[in-house]
Amino acid sequence: MNTGYWRLVLLAVLAVFLMAMVPVIIKYIEVDPWLIGAFRLAVSVVGLILLASMTRKPLIARRENWVFIFLLGLVFAAHWLTYFYSIQLSTASIAAIGVSTFGAHLLLLGWFVHKQPPHWLELFCVLLAFAGVYLVVPEFDLNDGMTIGLILAVISGFLYALLPLMHQKYRHINGERRTFGQFFVAMVIFSFGLPQAEWSIPQESWLGLIVLGVVCTLVAHSVWIKVSTELNHVVTSVVYYLYVPIAMLFSFIFLDEILSSQQLLGAGLIIFANILGIWFRSIRKHQSVI
């Protein structure tokens, strides 16, 4: 493994650490999800424009690539929106655990995209992950906000699993243009929800919004797009699972969220099942090459 590889891995760890701050900050500031998304994306779009003006790199993709850029932005916006509502309906920890099912979704999407039927062990890992999801909520009730929040987080995890595959498929588009296009399209989508959004923003919430916009979006997502495009999806998937324990630790420290032994067991099952499945897929892929 060369220095460039380990540099990408360290960048991936940094991006995950910064993104793990998101559920805690969103839960803490209690601002309307549409406002959070629009603000974060506006800050990121402006930041990318300023950076591009200094480096003189064009940010607008060629017209023939606009459909791809729109699809990236649409999936990204839907991922964010479902995740934000998940955090507000449940807890920061449960939302982080739910979205971590993205590894199981990635295995199933790999089956669909690459036409590779999963091994029985991979299917077992998927079932194990969703058994963990069931354990996370104290009482699985569709009339309960915790349950709805968890379901939204799982949907968000599915949408998040689509993004690395899409970025790799569209890697013929310059990375800066993909990043800018994804943020810009998502910003436009979020702007449609602003008229009915709750515009009351407590003064103490502004710092959280700025950190979300600059650190957790402009920096973290730009870095993540780079590493998820250049690193093997197995590596990025495993690194991503640092998100769950980091988010849970932040939630415990800053929000006083305490998980029961059953919820910790569920979280452990999800993480174990996803990492096992990703590792096994990597082994199978390596053997097929040999």
Image (tube, rainbow, N blue to C red):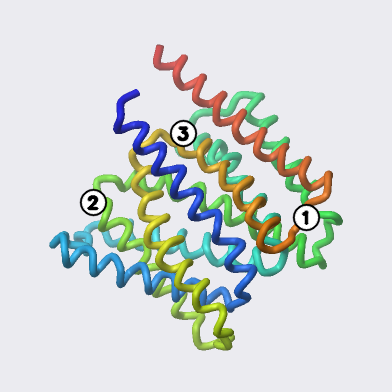
On the rendered image, what quadrant is the N terminus found in? top left
The residue located at (55%, 84%) in the rendering is 203
Residue at numbered disc 3: 235
Residue at numbered disc 1: 258
The amino acid type of the residue labelled 2 equals Asn
| Residue furthest left as drawn | 56
Residue at numbered disc 2: 174
* Residue 197 visible: no
Q: Callout 1: helix, strand or loop?
A: loop
On the rendered image, what quadrant is the C terminus found in? top left
Q: Nearer the viewer, residue 124 or 59?
A: 59
Q: Are marks 2 and 3 in contact (CB under 8 Å)?
A: no
Between label 1 and label 2, give the one nearer the viewer: 1
Quick check: 284 above or below 130?
Answer: above
Alpha-carbon span between mark 1 and mark 2: 43 Å
Q: Callout 2: helix, strand or loop?
A: loop
Between label 2 and label 3, give the one nearer the viewer: 3
Q: Callout 3: helix, strand or loop?
A: helix
Could you tell me residue 161's position as x and y percent?
51, 47
* Residue 287 visible: yes
Label 3 neighbourhood size at 10 Å, few (<14), some (14-19), many (20+)? Answer: some
The residue located at (78%, 40%) in the rendering is 265
The number of numbered discs placed on residues in the rendered structure image is 3
Alpha-carbon span between mark 1 and mark 3: 30 Å
Alpha-carbon span between mark 2 and mark 3: 22 Å
Could you tell me residue 32's position as x and y percent?
58, 78
Label 1 neighbourhood size at 10 Å, few (<14), some (14-19), many (20+)? Answer: some
Q: Quadrant of residue 242?
A: top right
The amino acid type of the residue labelled 1 equals Ile
